[in-house]
Amino acid sequence: MSFEIIFDESYERVVAEKIDGSDFFQVFYRQFLNSSEEIAERFRNTDMDRQRTMLKKSFYSLLTFYASSNADHYLEQIARSHDRSHLAIRPELYDLWLEALIDTARKFDQEFDSSTELAWRLIMAPGIVYMKFHYDRELG
């Protein structure tokens, strides 16, 4: 089975599930905020409902980037706003983001195994590399 199919099936399972009344993206943010003091501080005064909406849009932009190898306008905006000159989201923080995402998917997907984990990592990797790459570079 292809990694795209494994990912798609896992994603369908995680978005259909709730844990203690919380959906995938709510639990993800709790996991992510707990991953470092720096991240918790950056989100201290953030409207988390609005942030989850933005996360969903950016998540779908990462999926589109994987499928098309082209950054859409939204992903370009995110890369620009997160670069060193703006929000200064250090490249290492994307690693914490990915680990929180994987840990959350593991919690929500009862069928999560090593192939599923690899599928999530492979699908997310191109977009994460794109974001890290643009930290010190202007978008052209």
Image (cartoon, helix red, strand yellow):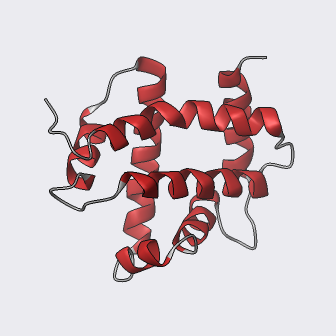
Above/below status of 18 relative to 30: above
- Which residue corresponds to the image point at 66% horizontal and 69% vertical from the top-left? 22
Q: Nearer the viewer, residue 61 or 113?
A: 113
Q: Is residue 66 found left or right of 114 in the rendered image?
A: left
Mark count = 0
Report x, y in % for residue 111: 86, 42
Q: Is residue 46 found left or right of 110 in the rendered image?
A: left
Q: Nearer the viewer, residue 52 or 40?
A: 40
* Quadrant the C terminus occupies: top left
Report x, y in % for residue 53: 42, 58
Q: Is residue 97 found left or right of 1 in the rendered image?
A: left
- Which residue corresponds to the image point at 70% horizontal and 34% vertical from the top-left? 118
Above/below status of 44 relative to 96: below
* Quadrant the N terminus occupies: top right
The image quarter in which residue 21 lies: bottom right
- Which residue corresponds to the image point at 71% horizontal and 49% vertical from the top-left? 14
Report x, y in % for residue 50: 37, 66
- Which residue corresponds to the image point at 41% horizontal and 36% vertical from the top-left? 129
The image quarter in which residue 82 lies: bottom left
Report x, y in % for residue 62: 44, 37
